[in-house]
């Protein structure tokens, strides 16, 4: 029989063991709770961060997919009016599109950007699209305009001895290659019975040509407004000839085939608002001058005088337009200035397709 002392010792050991067990169990439970409680929110935070990143990426992609870039015009034009008035911007916003107006030196640079994905709608003369098609670009012609012949001129220095187109033989004439200046110089010299090769052609984009002309490094410059009027007003140059009796084409609005296929509603809205700007611009010369004075860097009274140089007239694509564009393409090919014969019809749509986005009052001009 155990002694009383032994029984007391056993009872004490059992009590300590039981207390240890209870302590250990309690500690383990608390520790697991703390660990679990700390780790769970971390997991949720990671999920939330991941979801946030995905959401931001999707938003960015959606925003990028909805971006529309239309070339900025710094001329006295309905396109410039469209940007300044902001009506197109508002309409596109209701469709979920963001509008930007990138700026380019001239038509060829626009179409390079169009083909590279840096521009969605371009505004050029007849020649840049042909050179672009010759390079294999998937271009689509959207609409055309009146020629605005007087808005393009060949200017020479004020004191130049050049008094007629015949005097251009052997002279250095600057112009943007593949531009309206290039085309009209060709037309002008052929009209006088000699060739473009009889002139020393100096290929310069407008900003560089402006410097070269003002410094007397070239004998003439075939260029559009407002460069012409600026040089005349500054008494740097004078007009030798303008595009009257030379220009037989209008400007073109163009895009890529991919943009046309994916965004027909944008094109429809763009042409609707452009036509409104044409009508308003034609009827409000004073208001146009005030609106576009900062754009052209010319005083409003001078812009009012220039207003009559422009044809405020958006026109539809028809068979006559296509045939004329083919004629221009064939001319450039005959001079070996494009690498291959171009079938301009590759860039035109069917009458039914044009009818889907061309304003009815523009179509009526057929």
Image (cartoon, helix red, strand yellow):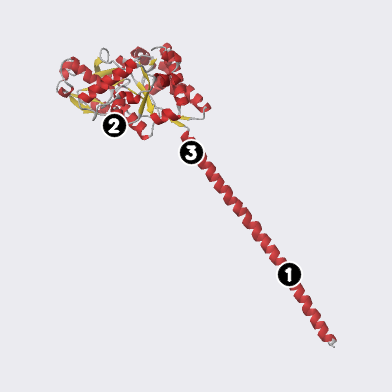
The Cα–Cα distance between marks 3 and 2, rounded to whole angstroms, is 30 Å
Q: Quadrant of the C terminus?
A: top left
Residue displayed at 17% across by 15% down:
192
Place of residue 57 in the rendered image (x, y in percent of width and height, measured from the top left) = 50, 42
**SS label for mark 2:** loop
Nearer-the-camera pick, 95 or 200: 95
Horizontal and vertical percent for residue 52?
A: 55, 45
Residue at coordinates 61% horizontally, 51% vertically from top-left?
A: 44
Residue mark closest to the camera, 3 vs 2: 2
- How far apart are the alpha carbons under marks 1 and 3? 57 Å
Q: Nearer the viewer, mark 1 or mark 3?
A: 3
Rendered-image quadrant of the N terminus: bottom right
**Residue identifier under label 2:** 135
Does dot 1 land on a helix, a strand or a loop?
helix
Which of 19 and 204 lies nearest the eye of the viewer?
Answer: 19
Label pair 1/3, CB-CB below 8 angstroms: no
First in residue order: circle 1 vs circle 3: 1
Dot label at residue 23: 1
Residue 61: mark in rendering: 3
Q: Where is 140 relative to 63, above or below?
A: above
Precedes in sequence: disc 1 or disc 2? 1
Label 1 packing within 10 angstroms: few (<14), some (14-19), many (20+):
few
Instruction: Give the image quarter of residue 321.
Output: top left
Say whether residue 247 is left or right of residue 42. left
Q: Can residue 286 be spotted in the picture?
A: no
Q: Are marks 1 and 2 in contact (CB under 8 Å)?
A: no
For disc 2, the neighbor class at 10 Å (few under 14, some 14 to 19, many from 20) is some
Tell me the mark number nearer the camera, choosing from 1 and 2. 2
Q: Quadrant of residue 19?
A: bottom right
Q: Position of residue 239 (x, y in %)?
A: 25, 16
Residue 208 as seen in the image, left or right of residue 49: left
């Amino acid at each position: 029989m155990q002694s009383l002392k032994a029984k007391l010792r056993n009872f004490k050991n059992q009590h300590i063991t039981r207390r240890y067990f209870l302590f250990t169990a309690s500690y383990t439970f608390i520790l697991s709770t703390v660990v679990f409680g700390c780790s769970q929110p971390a997991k949720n935070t990671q999920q939330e961060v991941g979801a946030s990143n995905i959401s931001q990426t999707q938003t960015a992609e959606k925003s990028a997919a909805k971006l529309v870039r239309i070339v900025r015009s710094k001329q006295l034009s309905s396109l410039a009016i469209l940007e300044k008035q902001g009506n197109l911007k508002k309409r596109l916003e209701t469709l979920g599109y963001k509008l930007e107006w990138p700026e380019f030196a001239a038509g060829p640079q626009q179409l390079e950007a169009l083909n590279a994905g840096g521009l969605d709608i371009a505004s050029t003369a007849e020649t840049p699209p042909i050179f672009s098609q010759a390079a294999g670009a998937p271009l689509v012609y959207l609409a055309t305009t009146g020629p605005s012949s007087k808005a393009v001129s060949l200017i020479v220095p004020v004191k130049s001895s050049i008094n007629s187109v015949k005097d251009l033989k052997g002279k250095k004439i600057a112009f943007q290659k593949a531009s309206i200046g290039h085309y009209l110089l060709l037309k002008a010299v052929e009209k006088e019975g000699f060739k473009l090769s009889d002139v020393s052609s100096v290929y310069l984009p407008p900003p560089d040509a402006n410097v070269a002309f003002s410094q007397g490094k070239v004998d003439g410059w075939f260029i559009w407004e407002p460069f012409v009027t600026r040089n005349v007003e500054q008494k740097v140059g004078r007009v030798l000839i303008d595009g009257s009796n030379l220009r037989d084409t209008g400007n073109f609005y163009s895009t890529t085939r991919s943009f046309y296929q994916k965004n027909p509603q944008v094109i429809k809205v763009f042409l609707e608002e452009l036509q409104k700007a044409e009508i308003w611009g034609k009827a409000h010369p004073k208001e146009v001058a005030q609106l576009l004075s900062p754009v052209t860097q010319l005083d409003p009274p001078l812009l009012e005088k220039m207003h009559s140089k422009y044809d405020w007239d958006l026109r539809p694509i028809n068979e006559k337009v296509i045939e004329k564009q083919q004629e221009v393409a064939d001319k450039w090919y005959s001079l070996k200035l494009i690498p291959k014969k171009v079938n301009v019809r590759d860039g035109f749509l069917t009458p039914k397709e044009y009818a889907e986005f061309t304003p009815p009052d523009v179509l009526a001009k057929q």
